[in-house]
Amino acid sequence: MRRGVGAGAIAKKKLAEAKYKERGTVLAEDQIVQMSKQLETFKSNLEEFASKHKQEIRKNSQFRVQFQEMCATIGVDPLASGKGFWSEMLGVGDFYYELGVQIIEVCLALKHRNGGLITLDELHQRVLKGRGKYAQDVSQDDLVRAIKKLKAMGSGFGMIPVGGSYLVQSVPAELNMDHTVVLQQAEKKGYVTVSEIKDVLKWEKERACHVLDHLLKEGLAWLDSQAAGEPQYWLPALFSELSSRDVTPEEANQMTP
């Protein structure tokens, strides 16, 4: 018969486990200290880099994105509001505030014809046009960041994913997932019909009509009741012919049923 494990062996085993645990704790603490030192060194180098390349970061969108990615590795937000080092050093707070104001101006100027929805691409083009040839470069990533800041202020701004990009919503209209899906369905042609919604989304007619009626009520869609076959619901924000030129309020009224 095998003899049972003695008390001495058990004690030695527990002592060994305690030593391994203690050693592991010491190693973990050492690693944390080393990581902290590395982060402090990296942050110091990042501040020196920001000071040296201040103008490039402010004026060049690609440079700005790269710098923001570098900051993210140490949990620093260079776009945070306030008068901290990053805000004062780079002036990015002023940059995104001014960009936000310009975004609002563009959206308000076009609201009469798109109801408060505009593609990110068109918004980008109009912002660049309004800034002039010698202004700071602005990327779509900059627009997205500025819009997120506007959204956080409760201004009614938001973004709806459509066709690999976004529709920018600049009015506080109540849009749920059904409305978003219909907007995505209309993305390719600029319009959608009740039959298409029923066939593609497998909805009942009442559900489709309810969503489309809401978009009409909010001014986000226009109804072409004389279209061949059945009425077409056009989304002016997705209608490339309208996006390619400026439409006056008088023209918009004539085109709206």
Image: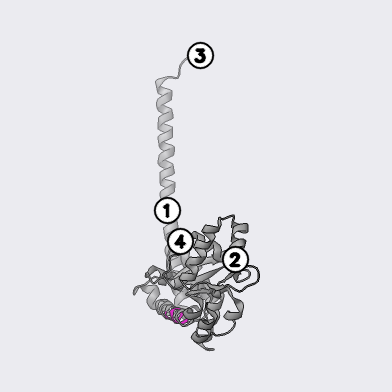
Q: Where is residue 77 drawn, in percent x and y?
A: 42, 68
Return the residue found at the far left.
83
Q: Nearer the viewer, mark 1 or mark 2?
A: 2
Q: Amino acid at mark 3?
A: Arg
Answer yes or no: do the residues labelled 3 and 4 have beta carbons within 8 Å? Answer: no
Residue beneath disc 4:
38
User: Can see residue 58?
Assistant: no
Tell which circle, 4 or 2, labels the residue nearer the N-terminal end: 4
Tell which circle, 3 or 4, labels the residue nearer the N-terminal end: 3
Pick the front one: 128 or 209:
209
Tell which circle, 3 or 1, labels the residue nearer the N-terminal end: 3
Q: Amino acid at mark 4?
A: Gln
Residue beneath disc 2:
193
Q: Amino acid at mark 1?
A: Ile
Q: CA distance from mark 3 to mark 4?
A: 55 Å
Q: CA distance from mark 1 to mark 2?
A: 60 Å
Which numbered disc covers residue 2? 3
Which numbered disc covers residue 32? 1
Q: CA distance from mark 3 to mark 2?
A: 83 Å
Q: CA distance from mark 1 to mark 4?
A: 10 Å
Pick the front one: 106 or 241:
241
For mark 3, does the 10 Å Cα neighbourhood hold few (<14), some (14 to 19), or many (20 or more) residues?
Answer: few
How many discs appear?
4
For mark 1, does the 10 Å Cα neighbourhood hold few (<14), some (14 to 19), or many (20 or more) residues?
Answer: few
Give the magenta range.
101-106
Q: Where is residue 135 drawn, in percent x and y?
A: 50, 86
Tell which circle, 1 or 2, labels the residue nearer the N-terminal end: 1
